[in-house]
Amino acid sequence: MRFFLRSNIGEAECERESEMIWIEEVGSNVYADLGVAYANEMLVKARLAAKIGELIDDRKWTQQQAADALGLTQPKLSKMLRGQLRGMSEAIMTECLVLLGRVVHTVVEPVHRSAWPGNVEITFAS
């Protein structure tokens, strides 16, 4: 007997049903999908941390060099880059982006009634 996995990303043949991987489409916020408290805040922090990591990698800095430049301890920076974001404020992460040569804009705009409540979005310019 043959088993097939079909999803929106393709099809694969499996010899046994136990080899099949089920793929479930989820929303745009994995934290909300998992029921994590403060899911929007966690997503914002995760995106900021990813950008900080990308900028550090672009400079080919070690974590210690980056930590020194950002005014953080190396263990604190390491935790942030590994996604351990509790205790790391968005303000500190924003300051890290500024120290890495980025201009950070905060825009507050009214939400349309149909989109209530509001939300937080992060957009990175190239």
Image (cartoon, grey):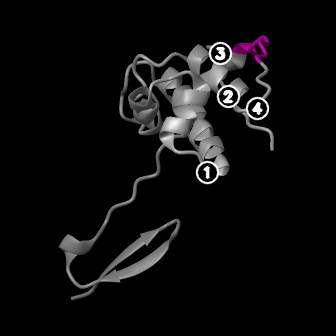
Helix, strand or loop at mark 3: loop
Do the CB atoms of the residues marked 3 and 1 lie less than 8 Å apart? Answer: no
> Which amino acid type corresponds to the residue marked 2 in the rendered image?
Leu
Seen in the picture, residue 55 relative to 69 is either above or below; the reply is below
Examine the structure image and report whether residue 41 is included in the region drawn in magenta.
no
- Mark 4 or 3: in front is 4
Helix, strand or loop at mark 1: loop
Rendered residue at 52%/68% (across/down)? 9
> Which amino acid type corresponds to the residue marked 3 in the rendered image?
Gly
Which residue corresponds to mark 3? Answer: 118
> Which amino acid type corresponds to the residue marked 4 in the rendered image?
Gly
Which residue corresponds to mark 1? Answer: 60
The magenta-colored residue range is 106-113
Q: How far apart are marks 1 and 2 (CA)?
A: 16 Å
Seen in the picture, residue 97 relative to 37 is either above or below; the reply is below
Q: Where is residue 20 in the image (x, y as percent from the top left)?
A: 28, 71
Which comes sooner in the sequence, label 1 or label 2? 1
- Mark 3 or 1: in front is 1
Q: Quadrant of the N terminus?
A: bottom left
Q: In which quarter of the image is the C terminus?
A: top right
Which comes sooner in the sequence, label 1 or label 4? 1
- Mark 1 or 2: in front is 1
Helix, strand or loop at mark 2: helix
Q: How far apart are marks 3 and 1 (CA)?
A: 38 Å
Q: How crowded is mark 4: few (under 14 residues within 10 Å), some or many (20 or more)?
A: few
